[in-house]
Amino acid sequence: MNLTTTLSWTTVCPLDRLEPDRGVAALVDGAQIALFHTADGLFAIDNRDPVSGAYVLSRGIVGSRGGVPTVASPLHKQVYDLRSGHCLDLPGVAVARHDARCRDGLVEVRLRQEG
Amino acid sequence: MSGGDLVVIGNGMVGQRFVDALHARDPEGRWRVTVLAEERRPAYDRVRLSAYFDGVGESDLNLYTPHDGVRLRLGEPATAIDRARQVVTTGVGEYHYDALVLATGSYAFVPPVPGAELPGVFVYRTLDDLAAIRAYASGRRVGAVIGGGLLGLEAANALRLLGLSTDVVEFAPRLMPVQVDQAGGAMLRRYVDELGVRTHLGVATSAIRPGPDGAVAALELSDGGTVDAELVVVAAGIRPRDQLARDAELPLGPRGGVLVDATCRSADERIWAIGECAAVDGTCHGLVAPGYATAEVVADRLVGGAATFPGADTATKLKLLGVDVASFGDAHGTTPGCLDVTFTDPATRVYAKLVLSDDAHTLLGGVLVGDASAYPTLRASVGGPLPAAPLALLAPDGGGADAGALPAAAQVCSCNAVTRGDVDAAIADGCADVPALKACTRAGTSCGSCVPMLKQLLDAAGVAQSSALCEHFDVSRRELFEIVRVRGIRTFSRLVAEHGRGRGCDICKPVVASILASLGGGHVLDGEQASLQDTNDHFLANLQRDGSYSVVPRIPGGEITPEKLIVIGEVARDFQLYTKITGGQRIDLFGARVEQLPLIWRRLVDAGFESGHAYGKALRTVKSCVGETWCRYGVQDSVGLAVALELRYRGLRAPHKIKSAVSGCARECAEARSKDFGIIATETGWNLYVGGNGGFRPRHADLFATDLSTETLISLIDRFLIYYIRTADRLQRTAGWIEAMDGGLDHLRAVIVDDSLGLCAELDAAMAQHVSSYSDEWRDVLDDPDRLRRYTSFVNAPDVPDPSITFARERGQPVPVREHPPGGSAHRRQPVTLGLPEVRR
C-alpha cells in the first residue's frame, strides 16, 4: 500500500475552458499538471513526459485503447492510461496522476504524491 | 592466375558487369585493369535503349561505375591482338596483358540487298544510331523497319513516336519468330495492327530504292510489292564481333563468335570471351542475362574460383508497343513427346501456351501474349511440377498461378537469383511485408515482375497483411477517405460511431483530420477538428525536444526580398530565437514558447509572410535553382515556376509531407529528382519526375512525362497530388505509393494522363476547389480570439512562461539545456530563463 500525501483542492478554471478530448497545462502548487476533459470524465496527470523529460503531455492526443482512456506523448507517442498514469507501451514507466473534479462549473485539482 | 595486367576490350553492358564483378572479388586490386572502349560514352543500358525516344536522357541509361585501379579508355578501340607478345594494339598505343577479356559484343546484321548503303538507312544498336534516326526523322512522314523481331518492333515503336507512319517487313511468317509461336505471333499482330503499324510477313526485302535526291525512298519486296519509306531501320539480327579473334587466329564457333569452353576461356589460356561475342561451347547468346552469367564466371576464375557457365536462361518478358509478351523454357515445344495446352481469347486478345512433358506433369516452357501476369510463377516452375491446373494457370490475370505451390529451389527473382527458399528464410527472420523482403533479399528490386509473388509468399507463410488503420478502424486510410468523401461525413465523432469503435487514438485522429482538411473541411483548428490534430498542427508550429516550438514562414521557391529577410532577422533577434537555414531554402526559427507564437506571427503576417506548413503533412517547399534569369546554363525560368507551384499547392494536406523542386536545366542544381515531384527544364518545356525522396530510404524520382508545356505540367501535377491524397495509405510517401500500386508507374500514367478510370475531371475539380479555398492558417488564427485562446502557457496562469524551457548559448545562439548532452559538454552551458521579448524600436 502506497503512502499517499493528500493536499487540498485548487480551483483551476471554468469547465468550459477545457476543450473536449484535448488537454491544457495548469500550475497547481508550483507543479505542472496536464488536465483533460474526456467523455470518461476529468483527468489530471503530471505534465512532464517521463521519457523525454519535456513538459508536454497536456499537448498529446487523447483517445482510448481497449476501452481505457489514454493520452499519447506528442514527442515519441508512448501512450499513458489517464486513470492510473501507467505507460501502456513501456513496462515500469508511469506518470503521477492527480485528483480532478468539477464543482459549480469550476474544475478543481488535488495533487497526490505517491511514494 | 591471380593478378597482373588485365585488358578488357569493350565497355558494353557485359564488359561493365565484368569489371564490377571483378572489382567486388578483388578488393586489393591484384589485377590492374584497362578497359578499351570503341564508343565515346561509357557503358549504358542497351536493353532500355528505346526509352531514349520516351525522353529518357543518356544519364538515366548510364551503367558505368568508376573503380580504383581501373582505367577506362573511351573512343580507343582495339585494332589487333599480338598473342605471342601478349599485347593489344590501339590507334594510340600498346597495352600488355597477363589476361585479356574480349567483350566486344555484336553488330547489327545488314542483309546484302541493293541500296543498303543509301542515306536514310540506319541500324538500331547504339545511342549514336538513335540520335541519328531522331535527327533524320525530323520533317519526314513514312518509315519502314526491316525485321519483325524484338528489336524490329522496338524500332517500329520508335518511328511511331517520332511521328512516322510505319511498315514492318519480316521474312518469317510471324512477328517475333524467336520468342513466340504462330498463334502468339498472330495475337501480337492484332495489337500491332491496331497501333497503325502495317506488317508484311513471310516476305523478304529485295532492294532498297533511292528517290530523286539519292536518299532512300522505298523498299521493294520479294512478293513484288513496294513500301514507301523515307527512313529505313534495319533490325534483321545481330552477329558476334569476332574480327579481332579471327585476325589473331583464335578458333571460332560454327556460327562465329570466339569459341570458349564452359569456363569462358578460349583456346589461348590467357584470353577469355564474355557476352554476345562469346560462343560458349559453340553457341552465342544474344540476351543480357546469359551475358552477365559469363561475366561472373570469368571474374570468378580470375581470382582463382571454379565457376562454370550455368546454361542460358532465355526466358524473356517485355512490353512491346504496350503489349505484354513473355516466352520461357521450351517455348516452341521441341522436347520429344511434349504436350501443348493453349488458351486463346479473341475478346480480351490474350494468348497463352504451356508446354508440358509427355506425362503432363512437368512444365517445360510457354508463351504468353497480351497478359503476362502469370509469367513470374510459371518461369520459376519450369522443370518442376505445375503449380496449379493448366486452365487455372492460363486464365487471364494468372489467378491460379500461386507462388505458394512453388518448391524451395524455384527461382522467384531471376534478376537477382533469389529462390523461394531465400524468401521463406527472410520471412522466417521477420520480414513482414514486401519492402522488407526487397531490402533483405534484393528480390523484386530490378524489374519488379516478381513483386506479386512476394505478396503470395507472405500470404502462404501466414503473415497477415492487415490493412486496418488501428484498433478503432478496420479499414485502411484509402478506404476511410472514400467513406468520408462519399458519405459526406464532417466529424470524427460521427465517423468513429458509424464506421469504427472506441474513442480514437494518435494514429486515426490525425489521419481523419488530414482527410477532412484534404476535402476542404475549413480551418484545421475549427470545432472538433482541433482536438484531432497532432501537437504540430494544433499549434501550427513544430514541437522540439524541449517542448518549445519552431516557426517556418513560407518563402516560395526560396526567393526572398532583402526587406523580408530583415524582418525575419529582427523577429529572431527580438524573440531570441535560434536561426537556421533549412534544406528547403527557407529559414527555421527555434525556441519559441506556445504563448510567443501569436506574437511572432503577428509580426511575420504584418510583413507579408504566411504559414510555411512545416508542421503539417502537407506541401512543404518547391525548391529551385536560379534558372535562366541569371544562370548562363539555364533554359527556363525555374524560380518563376517554383513560386507558382508553391503558391498553387500551399496548404494542401496529404498522407505524408510533400516536397518538390524545379531545376532550370539538365545540370539539376535544385536536386529535383530527390523530390515527390520534381521538374527539370528542357529546351522546349519541362520534364516531370515523380516518386523521389531523401530521408531514411533515399530514392530518385522516375521520369513521368517529357517536354511538357507549363499548362500540361500543372494539370498532371494537380492530378498526381489529388490521386495520391485520395488513395495512399497513412504515412506513405509518393515513392511507396507508386511502388505498391498494381501496375506501378504505367498504371499511374494510365490514370492521370489517359484517364483510364474516368477520374480526371473529378481530380481536376478537387484541385480547383483547393486552390480557390486556400487561406493562410496563421492569419486566420490571429483574426480569431477563440483560436488565439489556445496559445497559453498555463490555463490558470497565462502570464507565467513555462519555467522548464531554458536555454544555453552555443556558437552565439540559444540552444536547449539538456540533462545529458552528447559529448559531455554540459558544463559549458549556463541556463538562463528568457523573459518576454525585448522589442526594439
Image (cartoon, coloured by chain):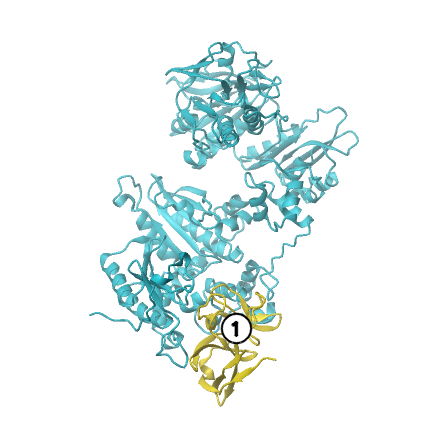
Chain colours: A yellow, B cyan
Please tell me whether residue B599 is drawn above or below residue B386 in the rendered image: below
Please tell me whether residue B215 is drawn above or below residue B610 in the rendered image: above
- Residue furthest to the left: B841
Q: Is residue B165 left or right of residue B379?
A: left
**Residue B249 or residue B725, whichever sits in front:** B249
Residue B492 in view here: yes
Residue under the image location 61 percent in, 69 percent down: B501
Question: Residue B452 falls in which quadrant of the image?
Answer: top right
- Residue furthest to the bottom: A104
- Residue furthest to the right: B359
Question: Residue B296 falls in which quadrant of the image?
Answer: top right
**Mark 1, chain letter?**
A
**How far across and down, in percent of the image, does residue B619 sit?**
41, 57
**How far across and down, in percent of the image, does residue B36 sit?**
43, 21
Q: Which residue is mark 1?
A: A95
Please tell me whether residue B673 is drawn above or below residue B613 in the rendered image: above
**How far across and down, in percent of the image, does residue A20 sit?**
50, 77
Looking at the rendered structure, the kind of residue marked 1 is Val
Residue under the image location 75 percent in, 27 percent down: B338
**Residue A105 or residue B592, whichever sits in front:** B592
Residue B237 in view here: no
**Residue B240 or residue B831, whichever sits in front:** B831
Q: Quadrant of the C terminus of chain B?
A: bottom left
* Badge 1 density bin: few <14, some 14–19, many ≥20, Cα 10 Å: many
Secondary element under disc 1, as helix, strand or loop, is: loop
Q: Is residue B340 left or right of residue B65?
A: right
Residue under the image location 41 percent in, 35 percent down: B59
Q: Quadrant of the N terminus of chain B?
A: top right
Please tell me whether residue B494 is drawn above or below residue B36 in the rendered image: below
**How far across and down, in percent of the image, does residue B15 sit?**
49, 25
